[in-house]
Amino acid sequence: MRADARRNLGKIVEAAAAVMAERGPAAPMDLIARRAGVGVGTLYRRFPDRAALLAAMGEHYVHSLAEALDRAAEREPDAWSALRAFVLWTGDAGRGALAAALAVLPEEATAGPGFMEIRARWLERLAVLVRRAQADGRMRADVTADDVVALLNLFACHPGSLPAHVASRPAWFLGLMLDGMSAGAAPH
């Protein structure tokens, strides 16, 4: 792929992510093209239909999760701090809006090999951090990576199912939930 084509691809996916976070998965393709600074023809040459664009966005989103998790693990002093930083990062309103838009995609939009591969690697990295935080004595031993994913899924992908006062302050409530996962919290 030529360098300009690769740049256009990245610009389109980034623009689509931003526009769909604002307007939902039915956002107009011409608006996405304008936001990306490309013509509608360029968008449709790369993504012949909305399903192809949504699949690319799903891959982009899961890549962003993996990168954010890696950044948190590199920057934070320990595994528990990295998990906290990552979970709070996911609660950002823009990311949550995109995750919510992607959560309603048909399964085939997120079933491609690229998506599944990066998702599996991301989930394994998360599981490693959970085990390290537990080994360090900072996280409850009965909490699993699946529990963290469920928390992310609720707050990032389905904020509409939360009470309004919770959805309006995701970082606060995510922090409370994380406190319940810390080693000092009583098991249920």
Image (tube, rainbow, N blue to C red):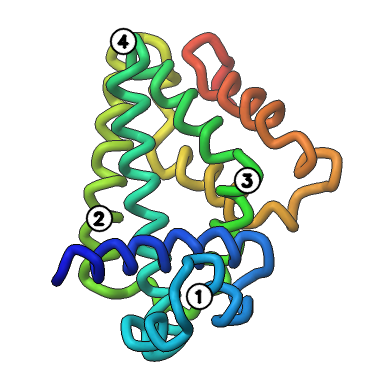
Give the mark, 2 or 1, whose residue is nearer the N terminus. 1
For marks 4 and 1, give the one nearer the viewer.
1
- Are dots 2 and 3 in contact, CB under 8 Å? no
- Structural distance between the alpha carbons of marks 2 and 3: 21 Å
Give the mark, 2 or 4, whose residue is nearer the N terminus. 2
* Up/down of 163 relative to 54, above or below: above
Q: How crowded is mark 1: few (under 14 residues within 10 Å), some or many (20 or more)?
A: many
Q: Which residue carries the number 3 mark?
A: 155
Amino acid identity at mark 3: Phe
- Structural distance between the alpha carbons of marks 4 and 1: 48 Å
Amino acid identity at mark 4: Asp
Q: Give the residue drawn at x 36%, y 70%.
A: 56
Give the mark, 3 or 1, whose residue is nearer the N terminus. 1
Q: How many marks?
A: 4
Q: Which residue carries the number 2 mark?
A: 118
- Which mark is drawn over residue 136? 4
Residue 156: x percent and y percent? 59, 49
Give the mark, 3 or 4, whose residue is nearer the N terminus. 4
Figure quadrant of residue 51: bottom left
**Depth order, front residue of 153/131:** 153
Q: Which residue carries the number 1 mark?
A: 33
Figure quadrant of residue 8: bottom left
Amino acid identity at mark 2: Ile
Residue 172: x percent and y percent? 70, 26
